[in-house]
Amino acid sequence: MLNKYPLWKNLLILAVLGLGLLYAVPNLYRPDPALQISGESSGVIIDQAQMERLSAALEASGIKHFGEKANETGKSGLIRLYDADVQLRAQRVVQRSLGDGFIVALNLASNTPQWLSNLGAQAMKLGLDLSGGVHFLLEVDTDSAIATRLEHYNSGIKKKLREDGVRGLVSLGDEGVITGKFTSAELRDSALSIIKKEFTELTAQRVDSTVGDSAFYLSALISEAKRKEIEDYAVGQNLTTLRNRVNELGVSEPLVQRQGRNRIVVELPGIQDTAEAKRILGKTANLDFRLEARYDAPTSDREQFEFRNPGQGEPSAWLERDVVITGERVANAQASFDQNGMPQVSITLDSEGGTLMHRMTRHNINRRLGVLFIERKSRTYYEVDAQGKEQIVKVPYDEKKIISLATIKDALGVQFRITGLDAPGEAAELSLLLRAGALAAPIDFVEERTVGPSLGAENIAQGFNAVKIGLGLVAVFMVVYYRVFGVIAVAALGFNIVLLTACMSMLGATLTLPGIAGIVLTVGMAVDANVLIFSRIREELKAGLSVQHAIEAGYGRAFVTIMDSNITTLLVAVILYAVGTGPVRGFAVTLSLGIITSMFTAIMGTRAIVNMLYGGRRVTKLAI
Amino acid sequence: MSENTKIIDFMGLRKLATVLSTCLVVVAIGLLAFKGLNFGLDFTGGTLIEVIYEEPVALPEVRDQLKTAGYDNAVVVNFGSDTDVLVRLPQGMSPTLGEEVLKVLKNGAAGEIDLRRIEFVGPQVGEELREQGGLAVLLALVVVLIYVAMRFQIKFSLGAVAALGHDVIITLGVFALVGWDFDLTVLAAVLAVIGYSLNDSIVVADRIRENLRKLRKHDAVEVINISLTETLDRTLVTSGTTLLVLIALAVVGGEMIHSFALALLVGIGVGTYSSIYIVASLLVTMNISQDDLIVQEKEGAEVDDLP
């Protein structure tokens, strides 16, 4: 029979509609502005009693709030506020009453009912242009990381050749090429085989003399794979350190992500103070390697430090004031296992570090070597300024803690290991700290965008207004022009917006201002499919086809056209996504999702309704 | 085709349209070459600060404040309203510049001033974004060329791409003429114009293809006129509804998507015209005929299911 959808098709459409509604609904629950409280280190416990105290402190300052609750794990707590305007003031009150050692972050607490979040349904994330906040693009100076590594190889080769009695002149050129100059071909060949054997990361080869002398040359380069590995390592290391530091800033949902070859994106929603953010992101931690002080050493030569992770045993230890080497000399640190399967950390120093370490340790075997982790932190004070406003004063200080204290078993060189660790987790953490303290490849800020919260709120309001008005105008036009079919198209359009919202929420896509523009454009294009179908049906009716055949032919013929035009647009959207960044991507995501959902709603959705209304019975006239 | 519909002789105006399009494109290219686009911060690099004053503020005063503070080449303009001020500084400055300028403005202001946004784009990033943008447009054109050539025929493909080039060049020309800021969002709009204009061209081309096969007795010009008449209703309704939405965006969407909406308005306006005149008249110029479509069969079979 013409124009009857089989039951499964109707059910499919209903099911998609139901799922769409389910996953779009969380967007209707507006989140509450809130404060999230967590400890600076993992040992801090936040309990309900503490939350009660904070609640009382807020009460005393006249800030209305509700729903204060400590997390079951005792690691964090949440206080909800009625008004986003008091969020900053509340943060100050809470921070003050807690003192140092806690992080108070501005947050948006979800109001999605539990059963919905259990299904994985969540509201869309808002981009920085809508929520307000800071966006940084950082560039990792990988060239300098490679230069350091080359220097390391250069001195390594020199040393190895000297040890093996191969005389020659080895130097590092500006283009990152290590050149060796030898007086005979035999010397060169033995040097070449040493380099090939000992320095597998380098590609070494014979080269002819360029200056026309009678010397024999060879050249060694870092292989492309190794170069990439060094770059990845430098970027990865910076990513880790940046993540740690961003946590310190107290931002509820920060984003720290690699972009491209050597860039890192940092997005901090809610942060306004870019100067402070930059200071914390750009700061460096450092390491000191120091010998443990002898018992009889005078106090002027020794210092007492606490352990960063006080386990069982001693809470602190005395170290010498003299520093053997600092973190700058650490080239790499990696957690691994020794031949007995025990966790260990292998450390690689640069050649100068190796020499210093060797000189110091060969006479101090069986003493203990400590590693100090030095971090720049700040204490917060509150002062009232001349205008009677409360000002936050941050005083920076260096926090020095011991992260490792191990017995020297042998004279140490460029490479050594720290063993005797209890768990693989401990090894991983130690290597992370060592790397964080080692001088990472320098980073530069290459892009920064700050959006104030007022602008964000305005952008949302205006964007949604535009969507509403645009949708309204289109709806009126369609109903006037296509009557009953217009109403059907408008219903499908509503369905389309629900589906698009659901898809974006499910994929965890971020809604940005260009994204809203993309939705608006999709509305225009979704209508196009229906216009194509309806004008085709009109034509077929004019051509004298019966109602049922006209509907059938209208949908059938228009389908090919819709397909062709939408696929080409989709191709353009995909290119936009692949080539573009930031705003262009946001637009591409909504546009391509919108094209896909609109094809479903505008073709299958409207057809189902049309079939239900007109299909399978005698209709002599269509309201089209 | 029913008998009572009047076939509009679109192709009768073909020569006139060709002259008009050629003129527009030449003028647009001239504008782009000699006046150039007013590239926004995204592409030039530099620093931009947007603030809101409590009271309307005189721009010369703000300029003076900045000048005395040593920022000689700051560009100060209103943005949307007379309390909203945008300060732009050229590239080659430090990333901390934004906060310093903000401090100067705060000291000079009578009342409170509210920071709306600070944007800093390094010169290198600006250059990369420019390259990426150009690449995106070219890539989009090439992919479209290939897809249309596969689905239709090479003559249609050339027509569609010519129409796209025409729309993009004229849209850019308008931006150069009026001096609107050309930033990343406008680039996104230009790419959307490609998508949209393509949509239009394909609908028209699709009908021409269908009618070329069906109406064997008519010559190509007649077939094209019939096809354009048949699709005119759809072309106008779709463009109309999209323009409605875009006008809504331009009017109430706020300053930050204003130029986006403008670019699309221009692009889709031109795109509607080009889908009628550029594609069709190029097909006539290239002597499209029934013979061009003989080899192709199995229509519809190669169309995928819903993705």
Image (cartoon, helix red, strand yellow):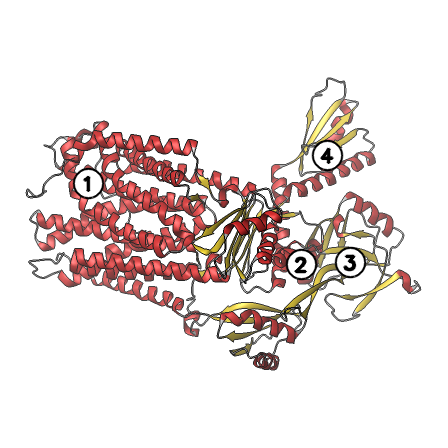
Q: Amino acid at mark 3?
A: Val
Residue corresponding to mark 3: A371
Task: Give the side of residue A128 with respect to residue A545, left or right.
Answer: right
Relative to A32, does residue A596 appear above or below in the rendering? Answer: above
Sequence-earlier tag: 2 or 4:
4
Name the residue rendered at 42%, 74% in the picture. A113
Residue nearest the viewer, comparing A566 with B280: B280
Dot 3: element: strand
Residue corresponding to mark 4: A195
Q: Name the mark nearer the viewer: 1 or 4.
A: 1
Which labelled disc corresponds to residue A428? 2
Judge whether residue A608 can be spotted in this image: no
Q: Chain of mark 4?
A: A
Name the residue rendered at 37%, 52% in the picture. A518
How many angstroms separate mark 4 from mark 3 (CA)?
33 Å
Q: Amino acid at mark 2?
A: Ala
